[in-house]
Amino acid sequence: MLWVALLACAWPEPSGAAEAAAATAHALAVWGLQFTPRVVLLERAVLLELERSLRLFGGQEALRRRIEKHSAELGAAGQAWAATALGALALARAAATSTPPRELGRALDALPLQCLDAAAGQAALLQRLGCRRLGDVRRLPREGLARRCGPQLLQQLDQAYGLRAEQHAWFSLPQVFRARLELPARVEDAQALLFGARRLLLQLEGWLGARQAGATALRLRWRFDTSRSHDGWGELALRTALPLRSAEQLAGLLAEHLARLRLPAPVSELELELQDRLALAGTTASLLPGASAQDAGVSRDLVLALQRVAARLGAQQVLQGVVLPDHRPEWQQAWHALGEAPRDAATASAGSAGPRPGFLLRRPLPLRSRGGLPMWQGELRLLLGPQRIEGGWWQRDEAGGTCHVARDYWVAANERSGLLWVFRSREREAHAQWFLHGVFA
């Protein structure tokens, strides 16, 4: 096995820092779940078993660099790698370097008694016996040591040295994500909130990684300093057009929104809440990656760029067209702010049996007729039709009028106009009228 121990605070723990250390340890545990489900909270430290995760994250060295960088951002005070959980914890407390499995025993022998909980509890007795380091304790007769100090000391020693199996209570993932962070100093600039928000986003990245999901809606709240007149909370809602998991990408979008924000009073606390998420589909590995994978990457980068533009210019300045499940041409498409389109609308299809033009007029254009046939740059020939479209009696427009349509559509053409999409209203024959509604490119 391969374990990494992350200390939530400096060791030994400073007085009065228990609450902050517990919050940091919880944040590290949530964040660590993206690497492995085998996460343990133990004595203001977080232990991760990573043997089965090395290949997935590019090997031990790549995983080590990633954990070192992000755990430090979350407030980890130290770390160490070892073949056993208690061994890694003892090495981290002593600020020792990570140790290969064959050298673990020698490294632990040189550590002071305080690095192992059971030995620290019996430190006074062990020191009277001439023991200053863990190696001295191991050289004592085991039967006499067990009678004087109890079985727990020998059990922890054997587990730390890999001579006895370890048993742990695994950290369980919270059902919902909501995290708070008390800022070390009062913040008066909205953009400076990104420093604290990034720590919360790293926790969210771990939670989403464990859930195999991506965030589509977040809410960042901040508490104003109670010593000022503006007591209360402010908030910022963030929606994404694509489900995102990366803290880097979410922080980039958040930075654009915070750049347009002004704080009426200093902020002392942050809270991040995940409001909506979507499952992320896994990617299929291929020896010969095709153009589809590249196109998907380009499309994702384009959507992220558009989201940053929308955050900078305003949500209503960048609109996204979606197809709706409606057979009436005017109601087959709707425009929403980027990232705010309904999920079902994004994948809906009209299900039309007849041909539809590539270009649709905003409003149908009335046509003259002669001999019952429509006229547009000359007399039109009806090539295909009729396609009957009727419905909408249940819907009202903004003015309160009905949206009911009753039409017969044809594909028509002549030498000058090309292929057109025309319809005749289904009214009494004396009032029926022809309209031009689309052009086939």
Image (cartoon, helix red, strand yellow):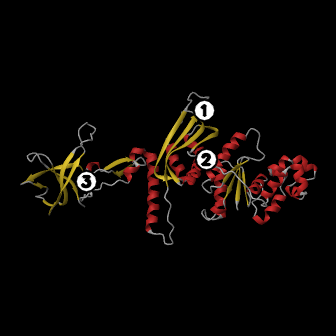
Of marks 2 and 1, the one in the foreground: 2
The image quadrant that residue 357 belongs to is: bottom left
For residue 382, say whether it is visible. Answer: yes
Nearer to me, 15 or 262:
15
Numbered marks: total = 3
Mark 3, residue position: 360
Q: Is residue 253 above or below residue 2?
A: above
Which type of secondary structure does the marked residue at label 2 adopt?
A: helix
Position of residue 277 in the picture relative to residue 50 (left or right): left
Q: Which residue occupies the extreme left position in the image? A: 371
Tell me how far mark 3 sits from mark 2, CA to CA.
49 Å
Of marks 1 and 3, the one in the foreground: 3
For residue 262, say whether it is visible. Answer: no
Position of residue 50 in the picture relative to residue 351 (left or right): right
Q: Position of residue 376 (x, y in %)?
A: 14, 55
Q: What is the three-letter code of the residue carrying label 2?
A: Arg
Quadrant where the C terminus is found in the figure: bottom left
Q: Are the residues at dot 2 and dot 1 in contact (C-beta closer than 8 Å)? A: no
- Label placed on residue 356: none
